[in-house]
Image: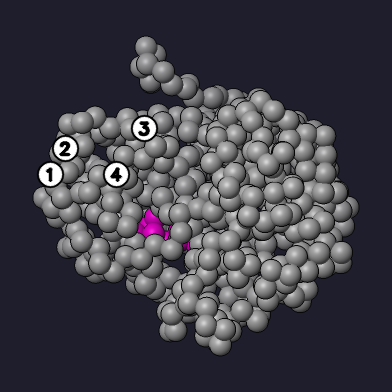
Amino acid sequence: MRRIYESGRSNVLANNAMVATSQPLSSQEAINILKIGGNAIDAAIAASAVLSVTEPGSTGIGGDCFAIVKMENKKPISVNGSGINPKNANLNYFKKNKIDSIGLLSPHSVTIPGAVDAWFEMHKKFGKLDFEQLLITAENYARNGFPVHEIEAYHWKKNEDKLKKNKITKNEFLINNKAPKFASKYRNIKLADTLNIIGRKGAKGFYEGDIAKDMVNSLNHLGGTHTEEDFYNQKTIFSDTLISKYKENFINQCPPNGPGVIVHLMMKLLEKFNWSNMNYLDPKRFHIQAEVTKVCFEIKESIIGDPNFSNINFDELISENSINNMFNKISLNRAYDAKEAYVTSHPETVYLTVVDKDLNSVSFINSICHAFGSGICSENTGVLFQNRGVNFRLEEGHPNCIDSNKRPLHTIIPGLLTNEKNQTVMSYGVMGGQYQPIGQAHLLQNIFEFGMNIQESIDTQRAFALNGKLKIEKSFSKTLINKLSNLGHDIQVVEDGIGGGQGIIINRKDGILIGGSDPRKDGLAIGY
């Protein structure tokens, strides 16, 4: 239980259903869908659609998504809604045109948006309500406006200059050349019209016809190689999850091209340390997490890519021999110099989770990569494009080297914990770009090593080893900072919070759902 004399949030409890998203209007819509007979999949899609309107800095229909769907009494299913690279944008194209890097605002950073197809295909497989019904509220917020919430307003203002660089984007996402202020109303009529067409026509309304033509023309005008064929070729991948045992439960992650495998590696490594006499704020705890991050990111950035172009042996990677080799690089007394680590981007995203009355659960993450993606907006559709292509390497022979119809190495990872009976124990996720595997490991440790509840586990202080720095939140004490510095860490105190997260735990014994949502975001958990 939290110390009630300190600021903080209580866990949210419910008997029937629970949702947790990063935005209150999104959470409310998910509950509305559940109350009119929709299931967890319907609610998650509707919530994500609302977020695509109300959190344009983090997500949108111009981006990608991943999900883990766990229907009660069925095995978990991984949903890969990440976008392919244009056919003509292969390594030879970049060599021929003497392009040696992919800029964050370049049309070459724009991979085909995968989220809309994933929503539609998930609904076909698992949904109950009409697909059109799931987009009505999102369309309404886009057409008639919604109140801009506090954290979103802050990030919108921070990216004001970026949004001015493209004329169409400036007109659609700024008001009189300024970011919408907190508690002001913002609308995107063109996006509302696009959502209406998608609702009526399904994924075809987005990937074929006038919307696709407009997106292609807008990107081509800036030098992109995109074609209507590229949009037509976008397909969602359904597969089994990657599973490993953690204590008495099982961690489920999506396979590559997402980095969910890194969570498995981290938890295997963290289990090798003795946590029994360690406080959750012990500097050794953050030191160990930092060192585990470094050795795991060396793996992530050297061998993981689109499995259609290269394969990794998951069982071999998490074998005892492999884990021991990584473990031997870690010292309790000094910081590891991760010379081989290479991190390509640190983007924005949204995460949400839903558990319905039948205990079907969805762990769902949607993103446009960096804040406001590429900053490129389609001329007549209101669609702001992601810049996920910056994650590619222009390095021949690398597993993540750019290629035709290839998916880049991603950052977004939903998580799901199941028990030995194949029942959902917890649906959870952590936002924050490259922080996500560490964030999931941090959350799992908080609960299963340090005895926290779901809200406490989300609230606690965070640190993140990235590019030679140990990034920490301002809430760290000077004593803790000094001890970490003495171990050789180059400390960087971040102005904002690190990441954000949501989670729902299912207490099957008492028939109660327990939800938590990150105070670093605008959102909340609610149930009924």
Do the CB atoms of the residues marked 2 and 1 lie less than 8 Å apart?
yes
Cα distance between the residues tagged 4 and 3: 18 Å
> Which residue position holds label 1?
486
* Residue 95 spot, x, y in % from top left: 52, 85
Question: Type of residue at label 4?
Answer: Gln
Quadrant of the snapshot with the N terminus: top left
| Residue 234 appears anywhere in the view | no
Cα distance between the residues tagged 4 and 1: 14 Å
> Which residue position holds label 3?
460
Residues in magenta, as a range: 255-265
> Which residue position holds label 4?
492
Name the residue located 39 percent from the left edge and 14 percent from the top edge: 4
Residue 126 vertical placement versus 456 (above, below) = below
Mark sitting earlier along the chain (4/3): 3
Name the residue located 85 percent from the left edge and 49 percent from the top edge: 193
> Which residue position holds label 2?
482
Front residue of this view, candidates 182 and 31: 182
Q: Would you say residue 263 sits in the magenta stretch?
A: yes
* Residue 164 spot, x, y in % from top left: 64, 50
Name the residue located 82 percent from the left edge and 68 percent from the top edge: 213
Do the CB atoms of the residues marked 4 and 3 lie less than 8 Å apart?
no
Cα distance between the residues tagged 3 and 2: 19 Å
Mark sitting earlier along the chain (4/1): 1
* Residue 405 spot, x, y in % from top left: 63, 77
* Residue 355 spot, x, y in % from top left: 61, 38
Mark sitting earlier along the chain (4/2): 2
Quadrant of the rendered image containing residue 526: top right
Question: Type of residue at label 3?
Answer: Thr
Front residue of this view, candidates 441 and 139: 139
